[in-house]
Image (cartoon, rainbow, N blue to C red):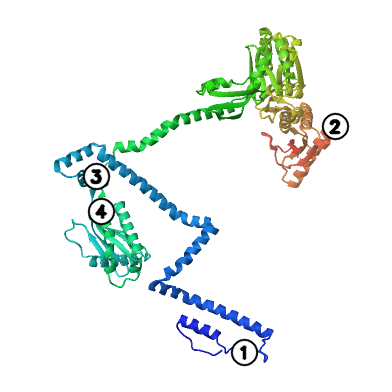
Amino acid sequence: MTPHATSTDPVKALSESRADSESPHTSDAATTPLDGVPSAHSLTEHFLDRLERIQEDAVAVSRVLPGAVARCVQSGGLGEALTPAVERALLLISRRNPRSLAEALTPSVGAALRRSLWASMFHFFRRVNFWMLQHVSMKGMQWRMEAQRSGKSFDEVVTEHTQDSPVRQVFLIHRETGLVLQEAQSLSTSSPQDWDIISGMLTALQDFIHDSFNLNQDTPLETIKVGDVTVLIEQGPYAAVAGILDGSMRPEYATRFKDACSRIHGEFSKELSTFDGDTAPFDTCAPYLDSCMHNLINPDRLPILPQTMLVLLLPFLLLATWTLPGVVDSVRWKNYVLHLADEPGIIVIDHGRKDGAHFITGLRDPLAANPQDLLVQAGFTPSDVSSHWEPFQGLSSTLALARARRLLDPPDSVVLDMRDNVLTLEGTATRDWIRSARESLQRWIELDKFNMDGLSISNAGAQSQWLRFLKHIEREPGLSVITKGIDTDGRFTIVGLADPLARTPDALLAETGLASDEVVQQWAAYQSPDPRIAEKRARHLLNPPESVNLSVRDGVLHLEGEAPAPWIRLAETLSKSIPGVRSLYVDHLVNTDQRNLKQAIGRIEKNVFQLLAGAPDLRPGQADKLTQLTKDIAQLRRSARRNNIDFLIEIRGHTAPTGATQRDTLMAESLARSFLELLSRRSEDTRLFTRRSLGSTPPDIGGATLDKPDDRLVSFKVLLLD
């Protein structure tokens, strides 16, 4: 391939690239055999090279295509060239996938149709109102009289009073150059404006707004209002129709300007797209501009008449009057059918109209409501409706209750009710009726459950005694009723729980005077948590001494008074097994063994014995005191044993001071040993004693001293062991 210079023009580069691809000086010629038949390898390379060149051409075309399209738009002709292709594409889309085309056009077409429909209805309303104003109103009569007086025609008078033309001037302005192509002005305009200057100012103003607010260049400037003057601008692809109006802009003028702009672009599209400064081709578009200045009805001068509203609403009123009876009849019939469908024991199978009359068919329970009565209540007569009902038995609770009343024929003192699909009987009746009703209900196949616990025998005496017996049971602690009622023989039945410590139900029954054969009782033994029964059980179980006051309050067993330690320990253990007792309160209970223990210790520790000097004997006069000491020791042993307490009695020796501490200690030790020997001779258990020498230290007992040289004393201290 021959190299060539690079061109800056994409189109030229594309043409040169294609020329090179078609040049006969290719490398393929070098690979062609002498006999002129290319080899398979050369063909493959040739096709690959061609494919690569096609891809390069596509890239080059994509680079130059936007610029080419832009030049075609500026020079014209692209729209005409693409129109057949676009039309063909739209035709194919509408045939192959009309739904997608409809979805794309629906937003714009739908909005346009709504606006058009609303505008058409509003225009029709104004035309009717205007006609009514001229012909069937007082103001129309005044205008006719004014026409006769002034010599003007009626139409001229109506126009003077209802129409005006606020448009002063209308201009056709070329969008790209800003030049005025054509203009029109009303006859009442005395000083026309120089729109060459104004159109330039509008172009500059629009450019200023677009630049200042970063708006798209295609966004048009529509209206400008200064005081009582409004400038209305309708933008088209190539030109704009602008006009000066007195007062505010009304939608009718915007519609006229839009219509004029569309017609001008439709007729002068080519001239507008190729405009070169010559305005002569646009002289014939003056009628379109004149149409923008025709008189229009002023809404402020055209009041809405009541007659107009009446005329417009009259067809609807006539239609409503004609259809209302049928609608009312249809609503009444629908309510009647719905009422029947909700009625228990009635099933509607079919309904409707036939030969101009209503008909209805279905199933009806003999005990259900009468459809004829409901028909009259709905506003129909039996002759208006053809009814056919087949008998059947409904299973609703309401019908079951009615069927039970018919089957049992209860007396007035018995009330029947259906509660949760259970037939309940309450009140008083004779024993025979109760027995018969129970047998009938047991044989009734449709009824699954019934409850006769609320029935009582009508014998006033027996009934009152039964109620009194139930009240005694309710008040008696330790008795709890589970069920009560009347059996198949008409006897009273009661099932419950009875505590062995409570009063027997037979005793309560005897107090009421009711015969025992009239009541069937079943009582199961249990332990009641009632405080009164719990107190009885505590007394029976604990057997407290007379010195103890026992009571149960709020689940707490209170023990007050005096009791020995073993009984207190027993009470603490057994109270945990008493139903209705949660805890034990003994703060006001005195342990007599502990009290005796303390008293014995106090008496023992108050004793001080005097021994003879040089002999292990007591001084005369202390024999009774020693006897009492042995009694106190025996009491201490009993009280300690009952309280599970171990102890030792410490015998302490005291001697008058001799000046030698060691000698005093030995003498005091000898005194304690001598007294222990004295106790052993009285059969005291020496294992309960211990000795201690305090030397010349006097006892802790008040009044005991070692002032005399021959003082030899013995004191005691009780040691409680853990």
Label whose residue precedes the other's in the sequence (2 or 1): 1
Tell me the element at label 3: helix
Question: Which residue lies under the disc numbered 2?
Answer: 681
**Are the residues tagged 4 and 3 within 8 Å (C-beta)?**
no
Task: For marks 3 and 1, give the one nearer the viewer.
Answer: 1
For the C terminus, which image quadrant? top right
What is the C-alpha distance between the residues marked 3 and 1? 93 Å
Q: Position of residue 421 (x, y in %)?
A: 66, 25
Point 47% across, 65% down: residue: 86
Q: Kindly identify which numbered label has been placed on residue 708.
A: none
Task: For marks 2 and 1, give the one nearer the viewer.
Answer: 1
Direction from residue 355 to residue 622 in the image, left or right: right
Tell me the element at label 2: loop
What is the C-alpha distance between the residues marked 2 and 1? 156 Å
Point 29% across, 52% down: residue: 250
Give amino acid for label 2.
Arg
Q: Is residue 118 above or below residue 171?
A: above
Give amino acid for label 4.
His
Label whose residue precedes the other's in the sequence (4 or 3): 4
Q: Residues within 10 Å of mark 4 (few under 14, many from 20)?
A: some
What is the C-alpha distance between the residues marked 2 and 4? 158 Å
Give amino acid for label 3.
Arg
Label whose residue precedes the other's in the sequence (3 or 2): 3
Point 22% across, 47% down: residue: 159
What is the C-alpha distance between the residues marked 4 and 3? 17 Å
Question: Which residue lies under the disc numbered 1?
Answer: 29
